[in-house]
Image (cartoon, helix red, strand yellow):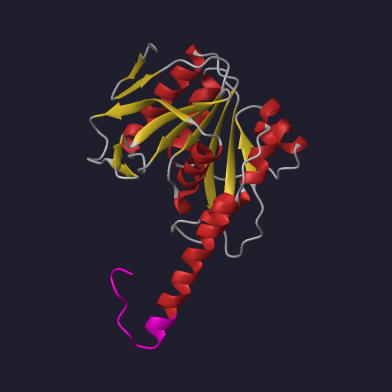
Amino acid sequence: MVKMVETDAECCQIISEDVKDAIILEGSPELGLIGNILGWLLVEELNMKQIGFVDSKDFPPLAVLYNGVTLHPFRIYSADNIVLFLSDFIIPPNVAYDMANGIVSWAEKNNAKEIITFNSVVVRKKTGQIAGAANTEEALKDLSDMGIPIMPFGNIGGLSGTLMTRSKIKGIPASCLFAEVLNQYPDPRAAAAMVDTLNRKLGTNINPEPLLKEAEEIEARLKELANTVQDGQESPAYS
């Protein structure tokens, strides 16, 4: 029987198996839902196993349905020394600090190699480029050596930003990868653009095609909706 270990951080509790010397990925939905979309792809492509979950009384009242089965809305997965913290809701600001501390404490206890978090940046026109930032000069050099453009100035919002600062205090290398988005809506194509960078960083062979197919379906639906509105027809609520 696998031993489940609890990690408490004020309002948050991590109940999970231990995975030593892993790379930790954090995927929570921000603009474009990049982290969440990419996280679901990783679960499928890497055949990741759920090893635990994060719980808090301050989480929204929510259960996730997957193939008809309810899942905890903030789960922890693992495969091949990669651990993924995957949230299906936007982390409330009042929870982000304690959440980050909980993840960093778990990482410190398990001697994690590094933390990688996913975010986005709003642009007027996409180039398909991925940018990066890091919490140490060494981690920043690793990104530069991979040919990843560095985000020189700005703010990192949400759980990503707090993870970057809390992990730095604990001496854990961390980097944040940014995909380009046009607005706040789900953007599988932007998430797919991040796959090549992630493959090179992790040494994996993740296939972005499922996301590209999903992007085409969303774009076709939006085009159909735009044509319907232009023609003055009423758009059905469900199709």
Answer whether residue 140 is magenta in the image: no
- Which is nearer the eye, 175 or 206? 206
Task: Locate residue 7 relative to residue 144 in the image: left or right.
Answer: left
Q: Main secondary structure of the magenta part?
A: loop
Residue occupying the point 52% across, 34% down: 47
- Which is nearer the eye, 66 or 60? 66
Of the 4 image quadrants, the one containing the C terminus is bottom left
Residue occupying the point 34% across, 88% down: 232
Place of residue 197 in the rendered image (x, y in percent of width and height, measured from the top left) = 67, 42
Residue 186: quadrant of the picture: bottom left
- Which is nearer the eye, 26 or 219? 219
Of the 4 image quadrants, the one containing the N terminus is top left
Residue 55: quadrant of the picture: top left
Vertical placement of residue 219 versus 31, above or below? below
Query: In this view of the protein, can residue 155 be seen by the observer?
Result: no
Residue occupying the point 37% across, 42% down: 88
Number of disc labels: 0
Task: Locate residue 158 relative to residue 41 in the image: left or right.
Answer: left
- Point out the residue furthest to the bottom here: 231
Place of residue 43 in the rendered image (x, y in percent of width and height, measured from the top left) = 49, 37
Query: In this view of the protein, can residue 55 be seen by the observer?
Result: yes
Place of residue 113 in the rendered image (x, y in percent of width and height, measured from the top left) = 60, 20
Place of residue 142 in the rendered image (x, y in percent of width and height, measured from the top left) = 72, 31
Residue 180: quadrant of the picture: bottom right
Answer whether residue 235 is magenta in the image: yes
Q: Tell me the magenta residue range.
A: 227-239
- Which is nearer the eye, 230 or 72? 72
Vertical placement of residue 218 versus 106, above or below? below
Vertical placement of residue 44 versus 188, above or below? above
